[in-house]
Amino acid sequence: MEPVLEQALNLPLLLEQLRGEDGLALLLLQLFPLFLVVELPLTLVVVLGVLRWWIREQTLPPRRSLYRPRVSCLITCYSEGADVRKTLETLCEQTYPGEIELIPVVDGAAANQHTLAAVRGFELREEWRRTRRVRPIAKWQRGGRVSSLNAGLSMSTGSIVMALDGDTSFDNTMVSAMVRHFEDPNVPAVAGSLRIRNTWTSLATALQAVEYLISIQMAKTGLSEWNLVNNISGAFGAFRREIIEQLGGWDTHSAEDLDITLRIKSYFGRHRQLRIPFEPRAIGHTDGPTSMVGLLKQRLRWDGDLLFLYARKHSGSIAPRLMGWPNFLMTVISGLFIQVVLPFIIVGYTAITAITLPWPTVLALSVLVYVVYLVVLSLQFLLMLLLVSERPQQDVRLIPILPLFPIAMLLIRCWSAVAILNELWRRSHEESSMAPWWVLRRATRF
Amino acid sequence: MARLGWVSLSPALAPPGSVEGLELNTFPSLEALLEQPQGCDVVVLDGPPEAMGTAARRLRADHRYQLGLIYTSRAGDPWCAALCDGELPGDGAAIATAWQQWQERQPLFNRGQAPEGVDQSLLCWLWQRPGAAIQPVRDPGHAQIYRYPLVEAITADERLNSDGWLRQKEQENLLEGGDLIDRIRQCPACSSSRLNYVDVCPECHGLDIVRQPSLHCFVCGHVAPQQNFLKGDALVCPNCLSQLRHIGSDYDRPLENYRCRGCGAFFVDADVDVRCLDCCDVNQPNDLRVREIRSFRLSEAGALACRQGLGDNGAIGSYFRRLKLMDRGDFLKALDWQMAIARRYGKSSGSAIAALLGVRIENIEQLFVDVGEARATAMLEGLLERLQQIIRDTDRCMRGREDTLWLLLPHTSARGLDRVRERLQEGLERIQSSAGAAELSLKFVGCVLPEQIQDDENAALMLARLAGDLR
């Protein structure tokens, strides 16, 4: 392994060798560190951001504010059943002293009677009545997530609107942590952090728990410092009412969360002072798919939708003129390159390596790649535990899962390639389960 | 031709020009009608519902219109329903028919004597209207919430407690309770139903209690009021200092606690005191008097009494008094006592302890229809006379329903019981031979103590069992 690493650092020698007989094999070998060249800077951006955030958190004096706008929580419910009550209860339990308006929107209520019954049966405790209101909406005909959000928006009265999932429960400091950011008039939206609620149900959920910690809680904390948050999660985001009304609400397609993030971001070029913070202290707990098959199905949807959003729907709006240079580069690198192009490079590289090189070399190379990724992951995890996590004692128990994580990620990345091809050829976003066909049929085609 | 008085209670309402078959007199106000020395036979009130209710009250308080027919021209308020005879039944002919029926029924009351006093007036009002009831009206302004406007109007001069009067007549078996309309709680001190139910501290019965939500920390088990946990925006356990983030996994709300601001006591459930808003008396909910609000109708016995005379001369009550009549409660006590004696000493004494005899006149209603009032009354009187001869001083009687009589005969064996039955039957035959074709048919049921007592039977159960055999 040693000579390979040495060669990688010696560029003139490398080029000379590439012209040699084993050129192709060497090229493939050299391609591998290039991933690190793209991924490492990104990781570095995140780590530096986290450090900056941590230092700021430690040094800032505690804030006391009288800014207490009314918050409307739009809770999209479908077939969650009694789980919705947990969501409503945790929202009522918020320590936020201002008013919170809960608007559970039951989509397809005629078919989802048990969810509707759970929502209607929810009663406010005496001590909540002063500052909490529940105003359920039953949409008898199914219209999809977007229609639920827009219906809820039209019925809501708060100046801050949160889009939340019916199967996500929240820490009791969530609303106050999120609302704090809106005191700055330049904040149009705030992204919240998501954790996996059913961590120990299966190996798949434990792996997702690690993934959420690294790629949401830690990564977004770091990116947020540089105003580079890539997505306001659909299960948990907060918006200033004016901005959503300015945008005309959510738009009919799948991945409405990334869509609205990109639409907000397209103001960044003209209004450079705007920023979308990520709040790592606002935690939502959501249920991840419990089986590997379920997880892959979910990613088939997510990753396919990603290509649809970046390449089809928003191909025009990904421009430095609209988003500003930093966000443009970020979207191109982390969005387009890492999430769309990289899976194909990985699949292609793995395939060619396996075909052209003898298997001991393949094995050795795989071990090397694995070790490198594991080391990077472990460092990230350690940083996350020490600086970002608000539940370090709980998260430390995930360490035994870490050795499996790079393998799972490789699998998921390869799967991304399938998802992207699925979208390219089959326009998979048009068969999304997030909205019924009679809604999608009417949507603008991209 | 009946005189119809049409009272317009609102200047906007014009009375009709004439009513066919009736002598129409129109009055611009109620005063105009009351000033008329010569009363009207039938009165029609025409005006807004509340005005008709008020007018009806005044009319029923006037002795000339206590019993007469009063109609309203349109649907009235509940007071109208309780005091009047309803909306106009139709054209003049319908009113004339109703008036005629009313007139025909009047001489049958109390053997043709005009009603005297409040008791007779009210019974007569019911008598004149078969099937009618004395209806309560809900009046939230009144301390007892429900009032009986008819009783109040007719007894206006005597300041009678209408509820007490109705209950007394029910005990006398002249009235019977109709539909149950409501059940109200009353202050045991002043009978007011204007009560305030307040939750109070169970320790000091102080009023100043507050709900105090409590939290239960899962880490250390600490339970304390929520205020003690709140540190800025976060919930932090004051005992173990761990931050409580998520309900269900870090903490829960186990108790619905109250705290008394007077004595500082903590408690889960507050006591409830009932404060009377009229007399300020404080009671426990269980100590309140429960009153059932019903309408009251003329009972079968009451109807019989109205027909046969309410006074002492020949009143059915006096017949029964001569029969040593007891009310149901006393009779049951006496029977229970006899049954207890029979159970204890019956086996050893060798002689019979007592016997119970039930007599039912099977065809009393039919009899009145078939042979007419006077004949039927005479036959009943004959039967009662016969009964009187048979009954010894030591025997006791009770009326069950209108047509049933129970006799408790101490020291009577099965043979003695048969003897009584035979003698009654003999007397009956004698009455019938003098009365002609009509037949008074009697049905008997008997029970000899202790032989025919069933296990675990008390007086009420025995009466119920025997009454079943009489049907």
Image (cartoon, coloured by chain):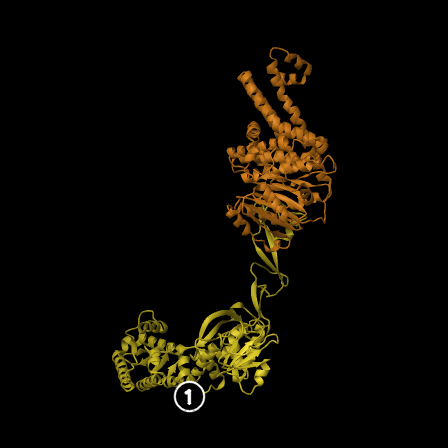
Chain colours: A orange, B yellow
Query: The N terminus of chain A is located in which quarter?
Result: top right
Q: Give the residue drawn at x 56%, y 39%.
A: A434
The three-letter amino acid code for the residue at tag 1 is Asp
Q: Which residue is mark 1?
A: B312
The C terminus of chain A sits in image quarter: top right
Furthest residue in direction left, as rendered: B415
The relative height of residue B152 versus residue B256 in the rendered view (above or below) is: below
Q: Chain of mark 1?
A: B
Residue B446 locus on image (x, y percent): 29, 76
| Residue A133 in the image: above or below residue A327 | below
Residue B403 higher or lower than A155, as above or below: below
> Between B73 and B125, which is closer to the camera in this rendering?
B73
State left or right for residue B302 relative to residue B282: left
Q: Give the residue at x 66% y 25%.
A: A38
* Residue B8, percent from left and from top: 58, 77
Task: Report helix, strand or loop for mark 1.
Answer: loop
Dividing the picture into quadrants, the one containing residue A373 is: top right
Figure disc tally: 1
Rendered location of residue B378, percent (x, y): 34, 86
Image-quadrant location for residue B330:
bottom left
Q: Position of residue A112 (x, y in %)?
A: 51, 46
Foreground: A30 or B216?
Answer: A30
